[in-house]
Image (spheres, rainbow, N blue to C red):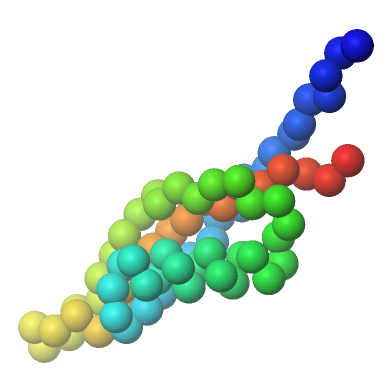
Amino acid sequence: MVPESRVARVTEIIADSKKSFEDAILNGFHRASKTLRGITGIRVKDQYAHVENGAILRFRVTLDVIFVLDK
């Protein structure tokens, strides 16, 4: 008997936070979890901090969300 193969998809999302990069990643993951089923991983592709007057105002991340497609 041949085992079934799985097929995954990658979706890019952008999330942000006023607190930290880690918080931005968690915000992105929690939001993606509301819509996408079968998430198996997340890859941080990019990080960016918005700065004004010598202070960081926002932490922004670009994430690849990997999830298995339904049968």
Q: Quadrant of the N terminus?
A: top right
Q: Quadrant of the C terminus?
A: top right
Viewer-proximal residue among 10 and 71: 71
Residue lying at 40% horizontally and 52% vertically, measured from the top left: 44
* Residue 54 in the image, given as x and y percentages of width and height: 8, 83
Residue lying at 84% horizontally and 24% vertically, measured from the top left: 4
Relative horizontal placement of residue 31, taking residue 63 as reference (left or right): right
* Residue 67 in the image, given as x and y percentages of width and height: 66, 47
Q: Quadrant of residue 16?
A: bottom left
Relative horizontal placement of residue 44, taking residue 21 as reference (left or right): right
Relative horizontal placement of residue 7, taking residue 16 as reference (left or right): right
Residue lying at 37% horizontally and 72% vertically, measured from the top left: 23
Residue lying at 31% horizontally and 60% vertically, measured from the top left: 47
Relative horizontal placement of residue 61, taking residue 51 as reference (left or right): right
Viewer-proximal residue among 25 and 3: 3
Q: Is residue 60 visible?
A: no
Viewer-proximal residue among 43 and 40: 40
Q: Image height check: is 61 above or below 66? A: below
Q: Image height check: is 18 above or below 24? A: below
* Residue 51 in the image, given as x and y percentages of width and height: 19, 79
Q: Is residue 52 visible?
A: yes
Q: Quadrant of residue 35?
A: bottom right
**Name of the residue lying farthest toward the bottom:** 53
